[in-house]
Amino acid sequence: MDVLRPPLIRIGGRVYRKNLIQEQPIPHEEEEDFCAGPGEGADEPCDAFVVEETERGFQSRLEVPSPLYKYIIGKKGETKKRLETETRTSISIPKPGVEGEIVITGQQRSGVISARTRLEVLLDSFRRRQPFTHFLSLPLNQPAIQQSFLHFKEEVLHKCSKDHGVSSSLFQNPAKLHLTIGTLVLLNEQEIQRACDLLQQCKEDFVDQITGGQPLTVEVAGVEYMNDDPAMTDVLYAKVHMKDGSDRLQMLADQLVERFVASGLMLKEWDRVKLHATVMNTLFRKDPTEERSNTMPGKSSFKERESFNGQNILKLFENFHFGEVQLDSVRLSQRFSSDASGYYATSGQLCFS
């Protein structure tokens, strides 16, 4: 990294420089102790958040999901004590598990601003380490698609079961076939509601214009792999594209991600959404119920994987036709869950028609 051009991070509409530091691995997340140093974060006044004047000085209130309280407190309360000492403020945190506001108070306005800024940098750092809880999805589990998928699975196991690493445990649950638009970390009901509200706002702002208020007819056909060597495949996916050859589905996915990233509810990972439906994944070997996240810093799951040789599958099923699907909604799907149909439980949805 160029120290003269450090990467920038956006928090709550503001931009901070990320200083180059040497991070040490921490074995137990619950005992992590982190605090921005005196030189990190802007201490100058900022109008991006409210600092109120009181009879005893100044205060600022910050809404924080209760699962993140422990990171502000730190091991044996050291992080909180250090922040209070260095900024000459007092930080009041609700009881564990109780949703509420963190209140920062101090005699100097600059101290309250400094504490607030450092808290936000700290919280952003730890939020990025949380495994995702929800994701925006387009269901691809219509009965005809499920039937075709099961036929695909049967044929692959019949013709390629002797290939290295190929087994029935690699295949997706047909009831959970889907296209993922993006993942989210939503840590309380308020954040889930924000995501639901934003979905509806997206419908008004651009989704209706893209879809014309009608379902999108897409074709699921052909298989492709994600890594560089087909002999060492970890993820095999079915390709998804609009039946009419337009790029409306791509536009829809990209604009949804852009809006959710701008709101702070989603992290930007790629310039464009990769439209795909996972059909085989080596992560399913150990956890057949759920595709785990591979993006958690310092917690790569690739070491746990046993890749499979997908060369014959790609050759024999390159143009396999799974069928056509009428996409009529975007779901805010809950990870590690199932509804009555076997698909992921839905926390909210955006309907096209």
Image (cartoon, rainbow, N blue to C red):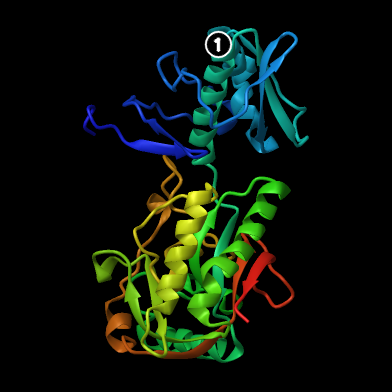
Give the SS element for disc 1: helix
Quadrant, the C terminus: bottom right
Relative to 52, does residue 145 appear above or below in the rendering?
below
Quadrant, the N terminus: top left
At 72% from the left edge and 49% from the top edge, which residue is drawn? Answer: 189
At 30% from the left edge and 72% from the top edge, which residue is drawn? Answer: 309
At 47% from the left edge and 60% from the top edge, which residue is drawn? Answer: 257
Query: Label 1 is placed on what type of residue?
Result: Thr
Front residue (pair 298, 82) = 82
Query: In the rendering, at what x and y percent does residue 302 appear?
Result: 38, 53
At 64% from the left edge and 16% from the top edge, which residue is drawn? Answer: 76
Instruction: Report the label total.
Output: 1
**Could one spot residue 279 in this view of the protein?**
no
Query: In the rendering, at what x and y percent does residue 191 appear?
Result: 66, 48
Residue 290 is left or right of residue 156, and the answer is: right
Query: In the rendering, at what x and y percent does residue 141 appear?
Result: 58, 81
Relative to 46, does residue 80 appear above or below in the rendering?
above
Front residue (pair 305, 126) = 126
Front residue (pair 335, 272) = 272
**Could one spot residue 306 in this view of the protein?**
yes
Relative to 130, does residue 138 appear above or below in the rendering?
below
Q: Which residue is mark 1?
A: 87
Relative to 224, does residue 38 appear above or below in the rendering?
above
Residue 120 is left or right of residue 40, and the answer is: right
Residue 300 is left or right of residue 57, and the answer is: left
Query: In the rendering, at what x and y percent does residue 205 appear?
Result: 54, 66
